[in-house]
Amino acid sequence: MSAASAAVPVTRRAVLRTAFTAAVLAGTAAALGPVLRSRRPRQTLTPAPLAEETYRGRHIAVDRAGVRIDGRPLHVMRRADGSYLSGVNHFQSYPTRLELARAAVDELGSAQLALASAPHHG
């Protein structure tokens, strides 16, 4: 028996199975392509400050993400009436976050804000 006569004949079933498998793989690749492309690392942009100033020698930046004094985050809470409270002074509210930051600088004096990752209430 020669090698040529030992070859398996190609049937219609084998051709259809191969075509179906190729179609499934192509469809899966088309569906997953956008998902896999979106996982590329993207450049993160820091939001532009809405207000930025130096007050009493301290750098204040107010943006959509929050308030920072000398680059450290100030814990800010919004009241129902639209005014703001800070973690530095819970007892007085201010009409804007910039005024709140100035008052926090006045209260802090030469002290720095803590680099706490989350506000601590207890």
Image (cartoon, helix red, strand yellow):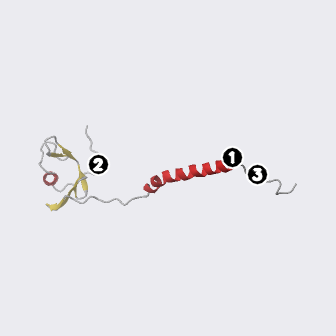
Q: As displayed, is residue 54 above or below residue 103? A: below
Q: Earlier in the sequence, mark 3 or mark 2?
A: 3
- Judge depth for marks 3 and 2 and give the one in front: 3
Q: Identify the element where label 3 is drawn.
A: loop
In percent of width and height, residue 87 lies at 20, 46
- Describe the element under mark 2 as helix, strand or loop: loop
Residue pictured at 20% horizontal, 54% vertical: 111
Residue 107 visible, this angle: no
Q: Looking at the image, which is closer to me, 75 or 24?
A: 24
Q: Given the image, on which type of amino acid does mark 3 rest?
A: Pro
Residue at 57 percent across and 51 percent down: it is 23
> Which residue is the site of mark 2?
116
Neighbour tally class for label 1: few under 14, some 14-19, many 20 plus, Cα within 10 Å: few
Q: Tell me the quarter of the image containing the N terminus.
A: bottom right
In the rendered image, residue 117, in percent from the top left (x then y), is placed at 31, 48
Q: Give residue 13's mark.
A: 1
Of labels 1 and 2, the one closer to you: 1
Instruction: Report the side of 115 relative to 58 (left or right).
Output: right
Q: Residue at x 29, y 48 (%)?
A: 116
The residue wearing badge 3 is 9
User: At label 1, which amino acid type do we have?
Assistant: Arg
- The mark nearer the N terminus, 1 or 2, is 1
* Viewer-side residue, 44 vs 94: 44
In the rendered structure, which amino acid carries the disc numbered 2?
Answer: Ala
